[in-house]
């Protein structure tokens, strides 16, 4: 099957970006939202963004014109999907809403059409069950903004078949992206599962009074050379986004408990820069200002703490055949602009050190942090990372 027509459902932050990307890549695109004003707002953002692409010399005005001609904004769902070869859903992150949307698409879209969801964390399998074509339903997790970020996490539902996977991988590449494969429908997939687990641990550490917010962030900046620390980053992106993924993990993942610090902040509406207050205060609501933290605060906290946990979650993904080491590291580098993948970093730090750190963390913060059997086995075999010539990767 050749994909020519792509339907995008939702013209919000992600939907308009995905529609723009597909149109710029030469596909015939319909973009559907529930009200004309939302569709119009999406089109306005697309025109603005395409203007930026021209300004930067990335596309020519005739190419821009062609891309805009490829786009058909719509309010009717039936019209949007009735000729589609590939549908990408980007409606709000609510399971029942997505299930309803998939049920509707299933009744209007051609039998051959693949139905993809851009969910950040919801189960692909349960969305697929709302249709009569579970084998043609798949996760296609774009990163924001879709026109610029190179990563797509392609996520298999329980019934997704190989042909659907192949077509989705091919389409991702045609869109100029670098897809990674998440072979199983695990909560948080690869990207959010790994990063959220590290974030949640430091939130527990602060909740228990072991470190302060400033100590954690100062160590990240002044010892690890990160542009900002975990809590500043949560303020910057909005705590609400991380919170929803975390709560979903808590619901679905044995032993994963969200730190009360996160829940309290959410309950108070202190969700970061967009509220004027988060873990830090912002004089102007909605305007980012880098929190001022003094360097002497950096002394106490080990900035690799999150890495131990992230490497552990990654090891479990490998052990359970969810993802390869290469895809895991690619996910973190392309999705979060990390200079080095978590498994490359784990190899450099030494897997023996990671296991011993995890044992300490587990003793204080609970079973979720228990060292992965894979890590323990690697250490037992002498696969310690760069220092032994073999870890997650091989070294000369
Ligand atoms: N924003 C991000 O950074 C990001 C990143 C990756 C994935 N996602 C995921 O993408 C999805 C969309 O997120 P968003 O940030 O674009 O949300 P958004 O709120 O900006 O946009 C959602 C749009 O969907 C529209 N909508 C609601 N019901 C609809 C329906 N039945 N049919 C068509 N459109 C409908 C809304 O009117 C709105 O315009 C979510 O599942 C989210 O988890 C978001």
Image (cartoon, rainbow, N blue to C red):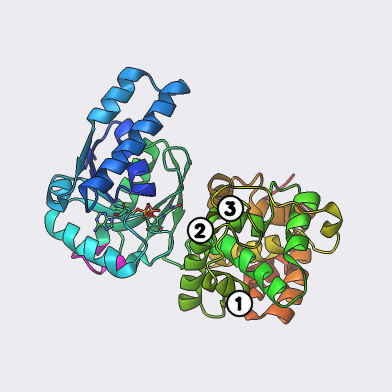
Q: Earlier in the sequence, mark 2 or mark 3?
A: 3
Residue nearer the viewer, 83 or 9: 9
Element at label 1: helix
The residue that appears at 31% across and 56% down in the rendered structure is: 91
Q: Nearer the viewer, mark 2 or mark 3?
A: 3
* Mark 3 crowdedness (10 Å alpha carbons): few <14, some 14-19, many ≥20: many
Q: Is residue 287 magenta?
A: no
Q: Position of residue 268 (x, y in %)?
A: 55, 71
Residue nearer the viewer, 208 or 184: 208
Residue nearer the viewer, 188 or 390: 188
Element at label 2: loop
Q: Position of residue 184 (x, y in %)?
A: 43, 64
Q: Ligand 1 near label 2 (Cβ, under 8 Å)? A: no
Q: Is residue 132 magenta?
A: yes
Rendering quarter of residue 315:
bottom right
Kindly identify which residue carries mark 2.
323
Q: Is residue 259 above or below residue 335?
A: below
Q: Position of residue 55 (x, y in %)?
A: 45, 22
* Mark 1 crowdedness (10 Å alpha carbons): few <14, some 14-19, many ≥20: some
The residue that appears at 46% across and 76% down in the rendered structure is: 252
Element at label 3: helix
Residue range corresponding to the magenta coloring: 126-134
The residue that appears at 71% across and 72% down in the rendered structure is: 205
The residue that appears at 21% across and 46% down in the rendered structure is: 36
């Amino acid at each position: 099957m050749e994909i020519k027509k792509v339907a995008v459902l939702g013209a919000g932050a992600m939907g308009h970006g995905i529609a723009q990307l597909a149109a710029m890549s030469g596909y015939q695109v319909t973009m559907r939202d529930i009200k004309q004003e939302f569709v119009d707002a999406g089109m306005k953002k697309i025109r603005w963004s395409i203007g930026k692409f021209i300004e930067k010399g990335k596309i020519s005005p005739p190419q821009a014109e062609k891309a805009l001609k490829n786009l058909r904004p719509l309010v009717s769902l039936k019209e949007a999907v009735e000729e589609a070869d590939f549908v990408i859903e980007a409606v709000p992150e609510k399971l029942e809403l997505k299930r309803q949307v998939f049920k509707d698409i299933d009744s209007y879209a051609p039998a051959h059409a693949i139905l993809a969801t851009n969910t950040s964390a919801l189960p692909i399998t349960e969305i697929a069950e709302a249709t009569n074509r579970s084998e043609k339903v798949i996760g296609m997790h774009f990163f924001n903004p879709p026109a610029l970020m190179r990563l797509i996490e392609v996520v298999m539902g329980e019934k997704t078949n190989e042909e659907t996977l192949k077509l989705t991988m091919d389409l991702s590449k045609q869109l100029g992206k670098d897809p990674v494969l998440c072979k199983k429908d695990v909560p948080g997939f690869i990207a959010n599962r790994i990063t959220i687990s590290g974030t949640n641990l430091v939130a527990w550490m602060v909740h228990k009074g072991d470190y302060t917010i400033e100590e954690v962030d100062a160590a990240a900046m002044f010892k690890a050379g990160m542009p900002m620390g975990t809590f500043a980053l949560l303020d910057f992106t909005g705590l609400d986004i991380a919170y929803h993924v975390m709560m979903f993990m808590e619901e679905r993942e044995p032993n994963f408990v969200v730190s009360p610090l996160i829940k309290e902040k959410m309950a108070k509406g202190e969700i970061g820069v967009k509220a004027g207050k988060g873990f830090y205060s912002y004089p102007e609501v909605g305007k980012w200002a880098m929190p001022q933290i003094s360097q002497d605060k950096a002394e106490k906290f080990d900035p690799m703490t999150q890495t131990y946990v992230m490497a552990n979650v990654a090891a479990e993904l490998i052990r359970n055949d969810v993802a390869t080491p290469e895809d895991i590291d690619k996910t973190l580098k392309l999705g979060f602009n990390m200079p080095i993948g978590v498994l490359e970093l784990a190899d450099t730090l030494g897997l023996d050190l990671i296991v011993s750190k995890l044992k300490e963390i587990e003793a204080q913060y609970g079973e979720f942090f228990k060292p992965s059997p894979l890590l323990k086995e690697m250490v037992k075999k002498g696969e310690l990372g760069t220092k032994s010539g073999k870890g997650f990767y091989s070294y000369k």
